[in-house]
Amino acid sequence: MSNADIQSYAVPGEKLLWLGRPKQGLMFSRKDLLLVPFSLMWGGFAIFWESMAARQANAPLFFKLWGLPFILIGLYLIIGRFALDAFVRARTQYAVSDQRIMILREGWFSKFLTVPLEQLQTLDLDQNGNGTGTISFGNDVQIGYGRRGGGIGLWTPALSNTPKFLGIADVRETFDLIQRARNR
């Protein structure tokens, strides 16, 4: 997949100002300071529960199988969410034009999202010491399954309903470019 793919979504007269891609591979966020210990406790307890249930010779089959879904959820929370996030980011492209921001996801979770610059109410910069970072174009809802954030987007940032440029290089330059384009 090349940046030419997202360029084909530009409308006549629209000028592309920036093209980019998210960081590839494993990516941690500040949320993981809480999510990783929680997922380890969840998975650990589910494995403990299942091992105790399996040792009970006279326990009903339902009791022995009850922990399996919780183990699968634990495996997703511990490992699977990072793999899914990397998979989605590998198929994601970003663009900023003189009219809007664009996010193109291809593959199983395909989606094309645009936000006109004049409708950007929130522009949040989260910069790391090495110059990479994330620009959010809205507020995350941390708890619940509302329209924004929450749900699977809490655990897998690349699938968040809040538009974001995740883990981009030279994030401050891109942030400033969006601010200038928005103020025109």
Image (tube, grey):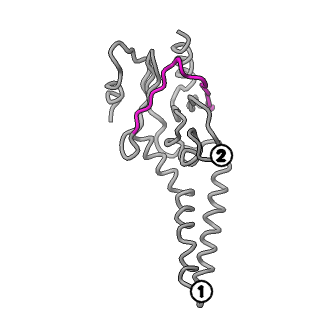
The x and y percentages for residue 136 are: 57, 31
Q: Which residue is the extreme one toward the top?
A: 184
Residue type (three-letter) at the residue carrying disc 2? Ile
Name above or below for residue 183 compared with residue 114: above
Judging by the rendered image, the residue that carries numbered circle 2 is 143
Which contiguous range is marked in magenta? 111-129
Observer-nearest residue: 132 or 74? 74
Residue 8 is left or right of residue 50, and the answer is left
Q: Amino acid at mark 1?
A: Ala
- Location of residue 122 with respect to 110 vertically, above or below: above
Labels 1 and 2: the sequence-earlier one: 1
**Mark 2 element type:** loop
The relative height of residue 36 versus residue 136 in the rendered view (above or below) is below
Write the residue at 53% across / 67% down.
69
Whole-percent x, y for residue 21 in the image: 44, 32
Q: Which of 98 and 169 lies nearest the eye of the viewer?
A: 98
Q: Which mark is residue 59?
A: 1
